[in-house]
Image (cartoon, helix red, strand yellow):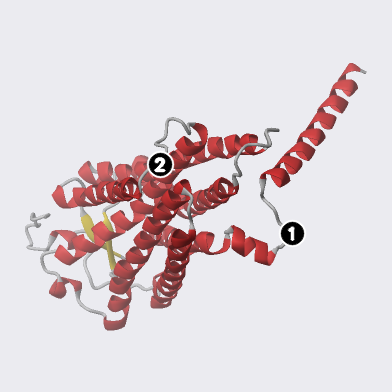
Amino acid sequence: MNASTPANDTPFCYSINSPPFKRQSAISSVYFSAIFSALGLISNFVAFIVLVKSFHRTHNRSRSSFLIFLGGLVVTDFSGLLVTGSIVISFHLTGFNWRSLDPHCHFCNFMGMSMVFYGLCPLLLGATMAVERFIGINRPFARFTAMPKSRTVSMVLTVWLLAGLIALLPVMGLGSYHIQFPGSWCFFNVSFEGSDQVFSLLFSLTGLLSIGVSFLLNTVSFVTLIKLCCKQDRTQRRRDHEIEMMVQLLLIMVIASICWCPLLVFIAQAVLSRQPFQVVKLLIGIRFATWNQILDPWVYILFRRAVIKRIYPRFNWSRDSIMSKYSSFSDTIRRFTSSSNRGSLN
């Protein structure tokens, strides 16, 4: 633990920002925390029930592995909202004194670790799922013919372990956790000095790298899957499950990018530019990131073949439907290209 304290005996986690904080703002209101936490917990609980039912019904090996990954993501999001939301809401309701309750910064370090752990886990899991789908679609023979469920579970546990090790680094001396405005939460110190700079960049670049890997591999997998679905070989197996998984994975990636990039880019920019730190921007970035935990579950709840067929019975993402859409799109491009060529020759 961070045992060093300043000369005035101020605990380390209060050495930069010391409670109580007198300023208040709308973005730090208890209503934001309560509404976000409630929406996220309900959404993830419903999604978990949906995933469990889907897991028991499925007989597809790759689909089972994908559902295990989604289950890990749901459990992570639910636990993160439960842990961090409980602390923040309890502070707003009771107004407890952090320095009296936590004189040695153990509680603050725990919350800081929770923020980092539950922040990185969804991004790392998204990248892992992208790798798994990339191998399954682009290199099917290089993949284990029937990857056991225990192997998938071990991959989820490995991601949790990696995120946990990163979250422990400030406690071990690389970076530091400090209480943050408005005094309801703790996070690592975003600074351009010393080990705080190293950890800030580590957190930001790990998240951005995960999003980048997901974007690259999912794009290649999506293009490959479209080509496979549009082949003229009528004897190929149906790929409805692959299409459903790919659509869900693409949506997860888009949501993660929109929700997390503002915070990750802001941290990297604040550290590298050496400009004065603006805590309001950090709070706004955290709010954006929280939406990831709220929106993710609705990808699994709504974007399933069974649900889409109920909403739009005529919708069909089978091989024949995709091939016809792809063929018409190709014909349009071909006609446009040929007309452009004729125009240039004239």
**Tag 2 secondary structure:** loop
Q: Residue 185 carries which label?
A: none
Quadrant of the drawing holding the C terminus: top right
- Identify whether 290 is placed above or below 234: below
Between the C-alphas of marks 2 and 1, the distance is: 34 Å
**Residue at (36, 41) in percent of width and height:** 205
Q: Residue 314 carries which label?
A: 1
Which of the two discs, 2 and 1, sits closer to the camera?
2
Quadrant of the drawing holding the N terminus: bottom left
Question: Residue 297 location, x and y as percent?
Answer: 48, 62
- Identify whether 117 is placed above or below 21: above
Q: Can the viewer see residue 291 in this picture?
A: no
Question: Residue 196 location, x and y as percent?
Answer: 24, 46
Closer-to-camera residue (233/217): 233
Q: Residue 146 carries which label?
A: 2
Question: Residue 36 location, x and y as percent?
Answer: 43, 71
* Amino acid bearing label 1: Arg
Closer-to-camera residue (190/317): 317
Q: Can the viewer see residue 136 in this picture?
A: yes
* Amino acid bearing label 2: Ala
Q: Which of the two discs, 2 and 1, labels the residue nearer the N terminus?
A: 2
**Residue at (37, 47) in percent of width and height:** 124
Question: Residue 322 location, x and y as percent?
Answer: 70, 44
